[in-house]
Image (tube, rainbow, N blue to C red):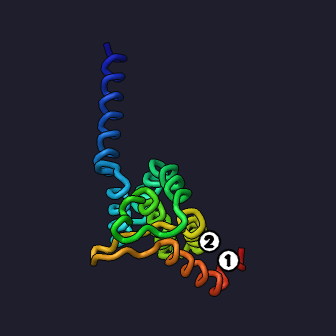
Amino acid sequence: MRGVMCAVTMAALWIAGVGRAQDEFGDASSQTLTTKAWEALGSGNFDKVALFTAKCQELYAKEAEKQQAGLTDFLPSDKGHDAWALNDVGTCCFIQGQAFEKQDRKADAAAAYKKAAESYGFAQCWDPKGWFWRPAEAAAQRLKQLEFDGVLDAK
């Protein structure tokens, strides 16, 4: 009887933990995860940035790579949301770079920016002000700045 109660208790704790993780990820859409990553970056919660960006990449990187491979240029503004996985995964790489920079982890920031620039070059991020910006271009600029600062030479 005691073993059964222990097993039931452990199962309940495991289910509660899964439920908490699901609550934390919301509907786990790429848009939700990216939004949560931006919010975590804004509040300086770098553990949450890592959690949300990693989950977005885990779930959507393959689709993002397919979408990237199917493009030869940026989608026009009226079609920009069609590359949803590419946009969100590329943006999450940029967000990771920003978080690493804020933690003075320059080499990690450079790696995240390089991933955004090289793997997700046609990603676009919707700004609530009503326009798309390009995370890969912003990442490439940050990467150049880090190189200029000599951070990468110190490796």
Mark with earlier residue (2, 1): 2
Please tell me in which quadrant of the rendered image residue 104 appears.
Answer: bottom right
Residue 21: x and y, percent? Answer: 34, 46
Q: Is residue 90 above or below residue 15?
A: below
User: Quick one: label 2, few (<14), some, or many (20+) residues within 10 Å?
Assistant: many
Q: Nearer the viewer, residue 81 or 119?
A: 81
Question: In the image, 61: left or right of 144?
Answer: left
Residue at 28% x, 76% y is: 130
Residue at 42% x, 61% y is: 88
Residue 143: x and y, percent? Answer: 59, 78
Q: Is residue 141 above or below residue 124?
A: below
Residue at 43% x, 56% y is: 85
| Quarter in which the N terminus is drawn | top left
Residue 119: x and y, percent? Answer: 57, 62
Q: Amino acid at mark 2?
A: Ala
Q: Is residue 47 visible?
A: no
Query: Cβ–Cβ below 8 Å for labels 2 and 1?
Result: yes
Looking at the image, which residue sits at the far top?
A: 1
Give the Cα separation between the discs numbered 2 and 1. Answer: 6 Å
User: Quick one: label 1, few (<14), some, or many (20+) residues within 10 Å?
Assistant: some
Q: Nearer the viewer, residue 97 or 117?
A: 117
Q: Amino acid at mark 1?
A: Leu
Q: Nearer the viewer, residue 89 or 84?
A: 84
Please tell me in which quadrant of the rendered image residue 151 appears.
Answer: bottom right
| Quarter in which the C terminus is drawn | bottom right
Question: In the image, 111: left or right of 29?
Answer: right
Say what secondary structure mark 1 lies in: helix
Residue corresponding to mark 2: 107
The label shown at residue 152 is: 1
Residue at 33% x, 74% y is: 127
The label shown at residue 31 is: none
Say what secondary structure mark 2 lies in: helix
